[in-house]
Amino acid sequence: MSTTPLFCAEPARRDTARRLAERFDLPLVGKRPTEGFWLELGDTRLALETIGKQGAVYAEFVEGAAKHRREQGGGRGQPVAKAVGLKGSQSAPYVVDATAGLGRDAFVLATLGCRVTLVERSPVAAALLFDALERASVHPDTMDIAARMTLVHANAIDWLQTLTGDARPDVVFVDPMFPDTGKSAAAKKDMQAFQHVIGDDLDTAALLESAIEAARGRVVVKRPRLGTPIEGRKPSACMEGKSTRFDLYSIKAIRPDER
Ligand SMILES: C[S@@+](CC[C@H](N)C(=O)[O-])C[C@H]1O[C@@H](n2cnc3c(N)ncnc32)[C@H](O)[C@@H]1O
């Protein structure tokens, strides 16, 4: 069971809280915690909360930055679109986002037409994603996009190994929390809470191997522009943006016999 408790002060939402607790194996508590981090289900959304000045953390596909990205995002010309191989009017690839986090990259790809499976192993992040997807799936501006997004609460290293035949994705997208990114120092206060609860991902080399086994077309690893690549394999190509780099692992280059 996760150590992050779930609290709900809204009588009308207690059933939903109970279902969330069961689904993501979170301890449901009857009193708002007075220390540490906790998930709180309010009348509009689920958020990760803490005492003090850090803001609440939640996944959001309808309002705020997601709305801006939907309306002004730069379409298929933006770096993440190019990295997964979205081109002109070609049909969009099926993408597994193996490190879904708060779903921002997955949402951009789904907005651009990709079917995306979001795999997330942290019960806290998975619960936040589940809540955001539920909200997006009933809002007229986002319901079509949300319909292309499927959440899987699992460790992607194992889950990717279960895929065979048509279930294998064209692209596996990987954006782990690296201990060496400096992201923690640079992260905004609210995101520090998320990083504190989730921790660093120390098994990225194994994730890259599972991703390469499962993908039919390519694996895309998102890194800070000056970050080191994942250990073990050399990328086939790199695409650099202002602050981000995408390391591409072409399956054709790794397994020339793959069709
Ligand atoms: C840096 S965040 C990803 C942010 C995400 N790209 C976004 O746009 O919000 C990394 C996330 O990947 C998850 N993660 C890391 N390794 C994983 C694995 N093997 N399986 C599933 N989730 C994983 C972590 O729990 C964390 O939530």
Image: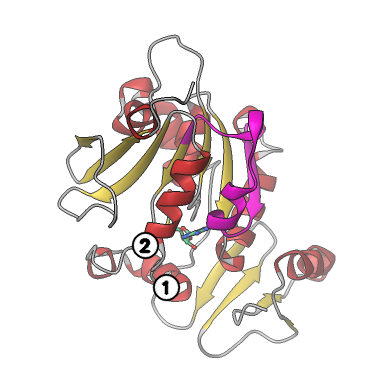
In percent of the image, x 36 and y 62: which residue is there? Answer: 177
**Which residue of the protein is positioned furthest toward the bottom in this rendering?**
34
Decide whether residue 169 is among the magenta residues: yes
Q: State the image coordinates of residue 137 (x, y, percent, origin top left).
A: 69, 38
Q: State the image coordinates of residue 8 (x, y, percent, origin top left).
A: 72, 73
Q: Is residue 74 visible?
A: yes
CB atoms of marks 2 and 1 within 8 Å: yes
Label 1: state its secondary structure: loop
Label 2: state its secondary structure: loop
Q: Residues within 10 Å of mark 2 (few under 14, many from 20)?
A: some
Horizontal relation, residue 85 to residue 2: left or right:
left
In percent of the image, x 24 and y 45: which residue is there? Answer: 234
In percent of the image, x 64 and y 58: which residue is there? Answer: 45
Q: Which mark is residue 177?
A: 2
Q: Which residues are magenta?
A: 146-171
Of the pair 212 and 27, the residue shown nearer to us: 212
Horizontal relation, residue 158 to residue 228: left or right:
right
Q: Residues within 10 Å of mark 1 (few under 14, many from 20)?
A: few
Q: Quadrant of the N terminus?
A: bottom right
Q: Amino acid at mark 2?
A: Met
Where, by quadrant of the figure, is residue 148 drawn? top right
Horizontal relation, residue 164 to residue 86: left or right:
right
Of the pair 62 and 232, the residue shown nearer to us: 232
Q: Which residue is mark 1?
A: 199
In percent of the image, x 67 and y 75: which residue is there? Answer: 6
Tally the marks. Answer: 2
Where, by quadrant of the figure, is residue 105 drawn? top left
Q: Amino acid at mark 1?
A: Gly
3D distance between C-alphas at marks 2 and 1? 7 Å
Decide whether residue 144 is among the magenta residues: no
Say whether mark 2 is within 8 Å of ligand 1. yes
